[in-house]
Image: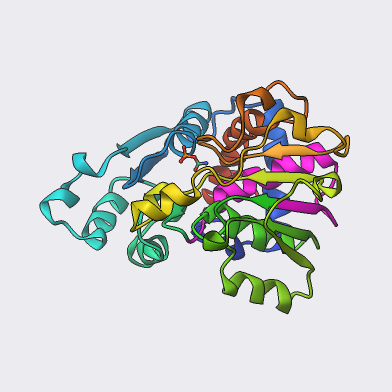
Amino acid sequence: MKNKSLISINDYTKEEILRVLDLAGDFEKNPSQILLADKVIATLFFEPSTRTRLSFESAVNRLGGKIIGFSDTASSSSTKGETLKDTIKTVSNYSDLIIMRHPIEGSARYASEVASVPVVNAGDGANQHPTQTLLDLYSIQKTQGSLENLNLFIVGDLKYGRTVHSLLMAMALFRATYYFISPPELKIPQEYKLFLDQHGLKYYELSDFKESISEADILYVTRIQKERFSDPIEYEKTKNAYVLRNKMLQNTRSNLRILHPLPRVSEIDTDVDDNEKAYYFTQALNGVYTRQAILSLILGLKN
Ligand code: CP
């Protein structure tokens, strides 16, 4: 993993993923370890973020490193017409590692090809969000005791949800059974179904989860991704397609945990928050430990 960019979850083997999760567990027990004292980490966010940027920045601070970067395209020279290539080449000279979020699919891979330091993809359009997936896997392993052979229910925007695409691919390594619940307009794209077919994995596409929720180990709820719609009327049609309410969690498995990459809009009612099966805020906390592990491994400070 040393000096290797992390662009897609497929860049890591199962063994590498398990190493990240193991190390994240160590950081959870001992979060303040001065490993990055002479390191500068750049965070280039061309799209808004709360959790990804701030948990990375918290991780760097807890490891004793320094942060540079921008959280808004408007404050960067890309508004003057600078190309992504020139921005990345410049920031490579200022930092030891670049964390980038960008609205264009494939932009992170491109950045890794022109950078002279490792690049970590913090989300590229509707494509991939691999560090979110690593924290999701950490959360699943922690709450279920294992990642193997789970019933994974994924609800919401399966077309544009990049966290869904990364998670689906990672959970294939652990022989998950998938239940996809979405409005017809936001179904899981064909390429991901093909991927699951090629891996011989079972999946079901449902229009609702009320009947089958009693089978779920993990209920992964996602927001309808408003920013990806070209037609606002289409967004209005689907935005309230699913709302999880506390009363719907009767007759669910005792091990069920509800995950959400956040931000939440209306898809999980706040009356779920106090249910012991609601795990999404702890999941976001797990992002700090997981990102500490990712940074330490890429920078060769742990192996
Ligand atoms: N889960 C996630 O990517 O959240 P942010 O958009 O707040 O970073």
Who is closer to the viewer here, 92 or 210? Answer: 210
Magenta segment includes 141:
yes
**Which residue shows up at 41% across the image and 55% down it?**
234
Is 126 situated left or right of 267 in this image?
left
Is 57 situated left or right of 259 in this image?
left
**Which residue shows up at 76% across the image and 29% down it?**
247
Q: Is residue 102 visible?
A: no
Who is closer to the viewer here, 238 or 129? Answer: 238
Quadrant that contains the N terminus? bottom right
Rendered location of residue 139, percent (x, y): 71, 39
Q: Quadrant of residue 30?
A: top right
Magenta segment includes 77:
no
Who is closer to the viewer here, 106 or 227? Answer: 227
Magenta stretch bounds: 127-153
Up the image or down, 32 lies above or below 6; here it is above
**Which residue shows up at 13% across the image and 56% down it?**
81
Give the tally of numbered discs.
Answer: 0
Is 160 situated left or right of 158 in this image?
left
Q: Quadrant of residue 229?
A: bottom left
Rendered location of residue 143, percent (x, y): 79, 37
Up the image or down, 176 lies above or below 221; here it is below
**Which residue shows up at 36% across the image and 40% down it?**
48
Display coloring: rainbow
Is 75 situated left or right of 201 in this image?
left
Rendered location of residue 62, percent (x, y): 52, 27
Q: Quadrant of residue 110?
A: bottom left
- Most extreme residue toward the top is 274
Q: Is residue 289 visible?
A: yes
Rendered location of residue 157, percent (x, y): 54, 53
